[in-house]
Amino acid sequence: MKDLTAEVETQTILELRNVEKRFDLDKGFLETLKFKGGRFTREQRSVHAVNNVSLEVKRGEALCVVGESGCGKSTVARLVAGLLEPSAGEIHYDGQRIDNKSRGQLLDLRKKMQMIFQNPYASLNPRMTIQQALEEPVRYHNPGLSRGEVRAKVAEVMKSVGVDPSWSSRYPHEFSGGQRQRIAIARALTVDPEFIIADEPISALDVSIQAQVLNLMLEAKEERGLTYLFITHDLSVVEHFGTRVVVLYLGSVCELADTRTLFSNPKHPYTKALLSAVPQLKDDKPNHIRLKGEIPTPINLPPGCPFESRCASANARCREEKPRPIVQPDGAMVACHAVEEGRLSPEI
Amino acid sequence: MSLLSVRDLTVKFAMRDQTVTALDQISFDLGKGERLGIVGESGAGKSITGFSLMNLLSRPGFIDSGSIQFEGEEIAGLPDRKMRSIRGNRMAMIFQDPMVTLNPVLTIGQQMVETLQAHRRLSRADAEQIAIMKLREVYIPSPEERLAQYPHELSGGMRQRIIIAMALLLEPQLIIADEPTTALDVTIQADIMELLLELCTSNMVGLILITHDLGVVSQMTERTLVMYAGRIIEAGKTREIINDPQHPYTQGLINALPQQTLPGHRLKQIPGNMPGLAAIPTGCAFNPRCPYAVDHCRSTRPETVSYASVEVACHEVNRLHNTVLEDESA
Ligand SMILES: Nc1ncnc2c1ncn2[C@@H]1O[C@H](COP(=O)(O)OP(=O)(O)OP(=O)(O)O)[C@@H](O)[C@H]1O
Ligand SMILES: Nc1ncnc2c1ncn2[C@@H]1O[C@H](COP(=O)(O)OP(=O)(O)OP(=O)(O)O)[C@@H](O)[C@H]1O
Ligand code: SF4
Ligand SMILES: [Mg+2]
Ligand SMILES: [Mg+2]
């Protein structure tokens, strides 16, 4: 295999190594007891939300995570943010292992890493004025600042996101969805983070407001050299904002590639189907690949490739053996037996 | 004769302290088997339009004036008893959330049979046969078994397909679909849209598709209405509206899409927000956000005029067009 490390000039800021996350469905001991074949056996059912995911985020990039509802995007975000603990595997930030440390031990890191949610209410307390909401993290992370300095910093941040600082005594519900999301971003930016985890930050917003918020995030990226882990299901946003893309399916990585490579030359059959399904604005002959079959539940994961039940190229090996991500000549990582064997069904 | 003809339809909401206007003199026609898109951002009045056509407006909303003719018959203000025989029978609505239509405590079969028997004299066995046929038309695998299942036992995509099958049960002339795929993944959305398109074209069913996704409208419809603050501000052939929008708001909407800007560059944003009903600006409702607004726009409501093969409500459309031409010749 080709040695990739020589080509990588940029520094890795975040690394996931074989990360797994299972949510146990049967909590008590008794619930796990099942009567089968004339005797009791213990059986733990769990949701396999994230399965053996390895990826790196480079400093200054925007790594986008895409995939269908329930494929584990938010779980990945919450694992990285330390809101969930992995069931297996390791997460490293800036050379330091973070998944086995308590939130208290990671105080420094919490300042460097901020999270933005789809629903800005999740990041803004409805009973706090915008001034209070923005002051809190500033004070928390800069205990030395005087009252005047804190106020000045808050006003500066509000201006930078295009919200009138004279509105600072208002409550979140007095703002529109787009303004609220901009304020949530402002709040994340007050502590000068270097890494932002954004979970569908613009999905609930209208097109014109999406543009406002996306521009704000782009500016922050350029001016502050921010790194993003950006979760979305909107592929046109990925193409615009992402430097690299990781496609998840049922908690596994199907494909990970530079944005341009992924859009111009998708390789995994699922990526191909996904791209073909996006309604195009100007071309009226859609070439949509219809996926057949049912999506398995993450409770009973198939033993082989997770996409096998809907894949036109699936064969016996796909049903038995999980494909591992393999680096392609153009740098894309693809986990698919058919791609590896060069026998991808021609119609897709 | 057109299938549907709406003239100067005005819908208001009687709020505690004031009455606000949700639909402001909207007019449009829909031919038999024609597919029409209604686009606009949240709060534009798209759903209220759909509800008004179906006579499903609930208090405090009411039709203030205007007419809705369906197959030549006036249906605005028709008593609910009469409307009920049209609804479901000759026109049907598909909502974003299938659970609005599906009853969680009845099986799919019970619901379909009930709907059929409410409108047609049919035996239970015959009704079931029709239900199975309709489920097959929307590609539901093993439809016989699905009849015995409850809505929660099915995936979101399958539920939405069942909703489409139910909308088609009585072979309506018109389907109004309000964001039918917004809650679904893109691959499933594409399947459902393809299906809807296929069924509408093969059965000559008229379709009003409400969405905020211009890509969906572009692939599904022949004509499009663009709404802003309760008015139709641009109407015409979908192709022309997408390729050559005339109204500054439509231009703004299309230009704001990420695919209209080179990757990594600043998107062309529209400043500000859609106004609430209680604060619709005088003159042109879009004027505070419009880069071309002049004094006239702030004082006088623009009438709808024909321009470059679309209908558009903007004072400055002439000047705007000339500016563009000058830019191009420069
Ligand atoms: N706390 C939990 N307990 C049990 N299962 C969970 C929990 N959180 C998530 N899951 C399951 O894990 C899987 C992945 O969920 P996740 O929220 O990460 O998906 P997602 O890709 O973010 O989806 P969406 O696009 O709908 O937000 C799903 O099957 C979900 O039901
Ligand atoms: N019951 C109601 N009482 C008062 N105002 C209402 C009511 N229902 C809707 N409205 C208002 O009417 C306007 C139009 O609403 P409508 O639901 O038609 O918007 P829409 O275009 O469908 O938006 P969305 O994309 O969010 O579905 C909005 O300003 C909304 O707040
Ligand atoms: S009427 Fe005036 S304000 Fe309204 S869209 Fe046209 S130019 Fe802009
Ligand atoms: Mg999620
Ligand atoms: Mg609506």
Image: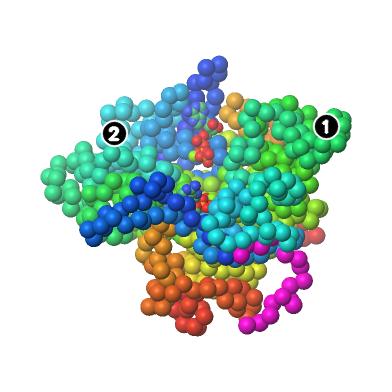
Indicate which disc residue B84 carries.
Answer: 2
Q: Does the beta carbon of the residue at mark 2 sit less than 8 Å from ligand 2?
A: no
Residue A137 colored in magenta in the image: no
Q: Which residue is drawn at 44% across and 51% down?
A: A24
- Which range is magenta? A1-17
Q: Disc 1 residue type? A: Arg
Residue identifier under label 1: A151
Q: Is residue A253 visible?
A: yes
Which mark is in front, 2 or 1? 1
Q: Disc 2 residue type? A: Arg
Expressed as whole percent of the image width and height from the top left, the position of residue B169 reads: 26, 48
Indicate which disc residue B148 carries.
Answer: none
Q: Quadrant of residue A63?
A: bottom right
Q: Are dots 2 and 1 in contact, CB under 8 Å?
A: no
Expressed as whole percent of the image width and height from the top left, the position of residue B173 reads: 32, 47
Note whether A303 is above or below B301 in the view shown.
Answer: below
Q: Residue at x 78, y 40 (%)?
A: A141
Expressed as whole percent of the image width and height from the top left, the position of residue B54 reads: 37, 36
